[in-house]
Image: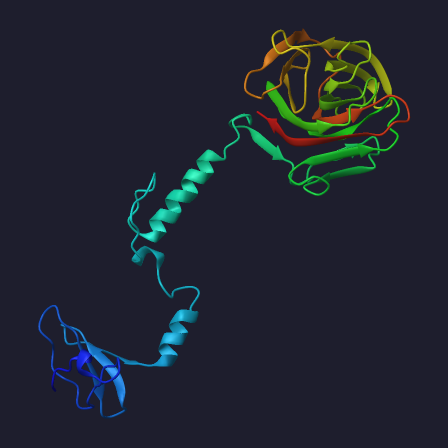
Amino acid sequence: MGVIDASDNEYPKVIFVEGAAPGTPPSGFVYVYAKSADSLLYWKDDTGTEHGPVSTGDVSAHLADTSDAHDASAISFSPAGTIAATDVQAAIEEVAAEASSGSTDPTIPTGGTLYSGTSTSGWTSFGSPDTFDADSTIPGHFYLRKASIGNNLVGAYRAVGSFPKTYTCKVSDAFLQANYHGAGLLIGEASPGKYWSWFVAHDGAVDTARLFQRYAWTNATSAGANTNYNTPTQGFPQLPAYLRIVVNSSTDIELWASMTGLIYYRLAAAQNPSFTIGVFGFGINGFGSIEMRAAFDWIHSS
């Protein structure tokens, strides 16, 4: 079999003379040849193993193979920036790892149980909300709406575990358009009957009309006394707002708040709601026949 120089051809092509398979090539070389038996191309590596035949069908099938056409680990990659990998598979994994670590929300407490606004499973609504959904009205959020809320508490709850417990939530946005409208965390009796709500709220008695407010409820339709608070250095709250209830026991409650989700202020300690706590949750309240709605990014229990 002779050696053919492709540059000597009239057109850019390589001409193979058909014949029998050659012997084993020297180490470091590969023989490519056309066999007279079927007029197809084969190649033989330096171990003497024959491969082939090569056909357009093989190439088409290879290119159409979405699961194993070219392993990403077999494709080289030149390290760049913070990516040190030298193959595509490892580079993709590095990028994914960096993206994951960079997307962690520092406002979400570590450990415990996170209830993200993607599902209402396990939550029991009360107060007949006109809308209670998750990842629907507002993507990635719990959403509560009551068209004519009155002087009532509307929300969702689930059973508590053993104490101590810390409950935290992020109120992303709320329709705080009128006096006593609020949104945030709540605790209540197991029935439930009595509640305590810990909300970011509108209060017309304050010049800025927005504050942190604790309400005692005889039941969801009967509001009792309320107490207003503001953080000592951050002033009057804005949205989003972050609320926290620390339950040391049913007779020892702490109320915390933050407007950044990073640094919390304890606004009340050693509070006694005068009922046995059986549920925790989130909700909205209002006053008069005005619509109230709010979006909650997440609730956390630890």
- Residue 67 x, y percent position in the rendering: 42, 64
Q: Quadrant of residue 299?
A: top right
Which residue is rendered at x = 9% and y = 69% of the image? 27
Which residue is rendered at x = 50% and y = 35% of the image? 103
276 vs 101, nearest the viewer: 101
Horizontal side of residue 271 vs 61, given as left or right: right
- Residue 34 x, y percent position in the rendering: 22, 86
Residue 127 seen in render: yes
Which residue is rendered at x = 84% and y = 17% of the image? 223
Horizontal side of residue 68 vs 143, given as left or right: left
Identify whether 207 is placed above or below 117.
above
Q: Quadrant of residue 274?
A: top right
214 vs 234, nearest the viewer: 234
Name the outermost residue toward the front. Answer: 10
- Numbered marks: total: 0
- Residue 113 x, y percent position in the rendering: 57, 31
Residue 198 seen in render: no
Name the outermost residue toward the bottom. Answer: 37
- Residue 96 x, y percent position in the rendering: 43, 44
